[in-house]
Image (cartoon, rainbow, N blue to C red):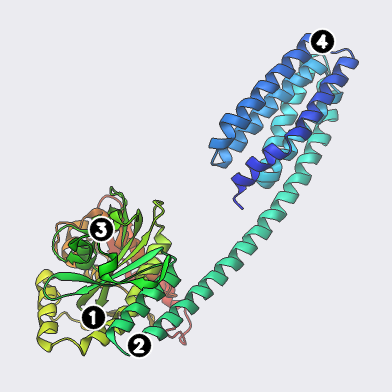
């Protein structure tokens, strides 16, 4: 559970206990001769602060800075209580309770802060009522410090257990996703026709990514895309294009223009879908009409052929995470060749040549014979789109490969985003700084999976990116000679 959620819940659940401690201290103070006016002012002030905290501040708080702010407010109240009730006396219990509450959720660091603030405030309040500094410090410090230290120890133990549990869950999730991917690939490979392969493909995406619905579009000749299969969780038997369609454009997409499908196909990368704006592409009208509010569109790239695009859709309008985009892109990339292989036999050879020519026309460098790049363990083969680092194969999308190839063509030199757009995206008008940055992010994540891939690409702020062969050479020197691809 999130620390901040736990803190909000704890604040509410322990409120009666804290109120009881404070009320007891104030009553005991009255009984030992404290000023009734001062006690009444403290009671009214704390009641007002508690109401604002519970109904205004806590519902909005999102970070540890809020807890530190509350620790400061509580310390101020503890100082005022010490000034009204005097030291030593019942006022000592109040800062001790506050310090324990905050240390439980901030660990040792919070224990030091809350204990220091509480001690200083209480001592200052005691001095204000005539107590000696050493007497006040000797009576306050052990109690507050003890409560904070014990609570800090409990918090650190809980943090360690939570981190271990989270790591275990992440490993389990990763293993589960890998098993789901393998099962999905097997079902696609075992299909006996293109139609069954496409349906197995869509079902596997639903299982692996957790989207509410999946729609698969394949090339219908030229630059057109046609919906071939659509599946949703509410209809496990699947939706045909006729039953899913509410108008002709529901099952027709173009690989031309500025649509999300066209951008994904031309750039060779998965794109987030949403209401539109800086962080996502506009949702297709047909998907919005069917009640979907967010998702991902990923290209099906087999070699240099863009065979189609795949939409993963959610009814929830929450932004799609980068991990989910990466998962969608990875599975579609792994599956595209298997799906394309089923459709190759049913398509005339001339149509395949036309598709390749159209791809080459949209991306001038595809048809050119580019040399293989080899340096310091990095190998890039443009004829097969294969890449490896220190003997470890790294699976890249077409635009990721082309972007890395452009950087590797000028090792150690800064390449500006405009040049990268031209090299990796064919100079398309829809590609820009945001596209380059997103592709660099995904490229770095994939390269980091190889022992010598971390730090290979460096950012030069305000200028662009460069490939740093020296960082790879140092990393390779520490990698055993027996490293092989997974």
Q: Are marks 1 and 2 in contact (CB under 8 Å)?
A: no
Tell which residue pokes out farthest to the right in this image: 32
Describe residue 125's horizontal placement relative to residue 191 as left or right.
right
Q: CA distance from mark 1 to mark 3?
A: 30 Å
- Residue 283 visible within the image: yes
Residue 338 locus on image (x, y percent):
31, 84
Residue 417 locus on image (x, y percent):
22, 57
In this orientation, which residue lies closer to the viewer: 254 or 480? 254
Point out the tag, 3 or 2, that comes first from the N-terminus: 2
Q: Quadrant of residue 481?
A: bottom left
**Which residue shows up at 60% across the image and 32% down it?**
69
In this orientation, which residue lies closer to the viewer: 120 or 49? 49
Q: Which mark is residue 191?
A: 2
Residue 409 locus on image (x, y percent):
21, 71
Point out the tag, 4 or 1, that comes first from the N-terminus: 4
Q: Which mark is residue 286?
A: 3
Tell which residue pokes out farthest to the front in this image: 243
Badge 4 density bin: few <14, some 14–19, many ≥20, Cα 10 Å: some
Against 191, residue 153 (above or below) is above
Q: CA distance from mark 2 to mark 4?
A: 86 Å
Depth check, mark 1 against mark 3: the one in front is 3
In this orientation, which residue lies closer to the viewer: 407 or 180? 180
Q: Quadrant of residue 295?
A: bottom left
Q: Which mark is residue 303?
A: 1
Describe residue 377's horizontal placement relative to residue 55 as left or right.
left
Q: Which mark is residue 35?
A: 4
Q: CA distance from mark 3 to mark 2?
A: 29 Å
Q: CA distance from mark 4 to mark 1?
A: 85 Å
Residue 297 locus on image (x, y percent):
30, 64
Badge 3 density bin: few <14, some 14–19, many ≥20, Cα 10 Å: some
């Amino acid at each position: 559970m999130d620390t901040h959620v736990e803190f909000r819940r704890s604040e509410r659940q322990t409120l009666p206990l804290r109120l009881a401690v404070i009320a007891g201290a104030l009553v005991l103070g009255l009984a030992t001769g404290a000023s009734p006016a001062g006690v009444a002012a403290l009671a009214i002030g704390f009641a007002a602060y508690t109401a604002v905290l519970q109904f205004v501040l806590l519902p909005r708080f999102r970070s540890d800075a809020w807890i530190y702010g509350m620790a400061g407010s509580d310390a101020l109240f503890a100082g005022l209580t010490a000034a009204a009730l005097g030291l030593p006396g019942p006022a000592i219990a109040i800062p001790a309770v506050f310090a324990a509450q905050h240390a439980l959720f901030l660990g040792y660091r919070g224990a030091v802060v809350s204990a220091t603030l509480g001690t200083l405030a209480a001592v200052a309040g005691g001095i204000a009522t005539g107590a000696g500094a050493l007497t006040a410090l000797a009576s306050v410090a052990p109690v507050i410090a003890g409560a904070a230290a014990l609570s800090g120890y409990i918090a650190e133990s809980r943090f360690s257990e939570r981190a271990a549990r989270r790591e275990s869950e992440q490993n389990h999730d990763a293993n589960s996703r890998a098993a789901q991917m393998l099962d999905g690939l097997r079902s696609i490979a075992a299909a006996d026709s293109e139609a069954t392969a496409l349906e197995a493909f869509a079902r596997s995406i639903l299982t692996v990514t957790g989207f509410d619905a999946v729609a698969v579009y394949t090339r219908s000749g030229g630059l057109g895309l046609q919906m071939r299969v659509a599946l949703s969780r509410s209809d496990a038997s699947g939706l045909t294009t006729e039953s899913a369609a509410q108008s002709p454009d529901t099952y027709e997409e173009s690989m031309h223009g500025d649509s999300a499908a066209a951008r994904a196909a031309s750039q060779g990368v998965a794109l987030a879908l949403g209401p539109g704006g800086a962080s996502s592409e506009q949702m297709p009208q047909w998907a919005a009409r069917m009640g979907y509010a967010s998702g991902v569109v990923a290209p099906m790239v087999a070699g240099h052929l863009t065979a189609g695009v795949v939409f993963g859709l959610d009814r929830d309008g929450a932004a799609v995470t980068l991990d989910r985009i990466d998962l969608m892109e990875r599975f579609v990339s792994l599956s595209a060749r298997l799906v394309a292989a089923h459709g190759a036999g049913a398509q005339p050879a001339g149509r395949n040549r036309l598709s390749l020519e159209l791809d080459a026309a949209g991306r001038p460098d595809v048809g050119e014979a580019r040399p293989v790049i080899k340096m310091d363990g990095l190998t890039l083969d443009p004829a097969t789109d294969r890449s490896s680092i220190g003997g470890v194969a790294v699976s890249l999308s077409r635009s990721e490969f082309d972007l890395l190839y452009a950087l590797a063509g000028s090792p150690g030199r800064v390449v500006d985003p405009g040049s990268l757009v031209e090299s990796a995206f064919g100079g398309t008008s829809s590609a820009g700084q945001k596209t380059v940055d997103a592709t660099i992010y995904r490229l770095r994540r994939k390269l980091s999976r190889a022992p010598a891939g971390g730090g290979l690409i460096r950012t030069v702020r305000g200028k662009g990116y460069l490939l740093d062969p020296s960082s790879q050479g140092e990393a390779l020197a520490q990698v055993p000679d027996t490293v092989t691809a997974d």
